[in-house]
């Protein structure tokens, strides 16, 4: 069963699928780390998370 955060990320990926080419945009490590950060945001990792979300077209 997916957590709420995982389900929202999948929904957002489907919603913005046309913005970034490729089926597997995040690596498994990136996705795991992003989910962990979203569950427990650490200020020192915020810049990394924002850069990842921006890179994938999830935020601008």
Image (tube, rainbow, N blue to C red):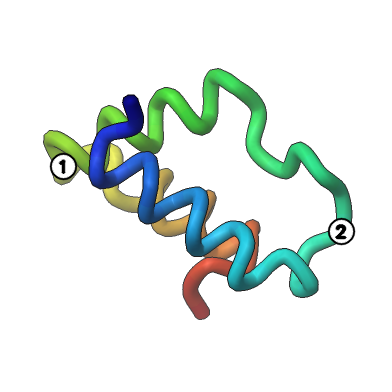
Q: Earlier in the sequence, mark 2 or mark 1?
A: 2
Image coords of residue 30 (percent x, y): 53, 29
Q: What is the residue that sits farthest to the right in this orientation?
A: 21
Above or below residue 16? Residue 42 is above
Tell me whether circle 2 and circle 1 mark residues in contact (CB < 8 Å): no
Q: Residue placed at 42% from the left, 45% from the top?
A: 48
Find residue 4 and report its image quarter.
top left
Identify the residue under disc 2: 21
- Quarter of the image containing the N terminus? top left
Q: Residue placed at 79% from the left, 72% from the top?
A: 18
Q: Residues within 10 Å of mark 2 (few under 14, many from 20)?
A: few
Find residue 54 and report its image quarter.
bottom right
Left or right of 7 in this view: 42: left
Identify the residue under disc 1: 41
Q: Helix or strand or loop: what does disc 2 sit on?
A: loop
Image coords of residue 53 (percent x, y): 50, 57
- Nearer to me, 60 or 21: 21
Above or below residue 2? Residue 49 is below
- Nearer to me, 42 or 6: 6
Q: Helix or strand or loop: what does disc 1 sit on?
A: loop
Q: What is the residue that sits farthest to the bottom in this orientation?
A: 60
Q: Residues within 10 Å of mark 1 (few under 14, many from 20)?
A: few
């Amino acid at each position: 069963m997916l957590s709420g955060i995982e389900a929202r990320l999948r929904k957002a990926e489907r919603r913005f699928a046309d913005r970034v080419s490729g089926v597997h945009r995040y690596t498994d490590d990136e996705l795991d780390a992003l989910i962990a950060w979203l569950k427990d945001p650490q200020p020192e990792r915020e810049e990394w998370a924002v850069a990842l979300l921006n890179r994938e077209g999830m935020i601008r």
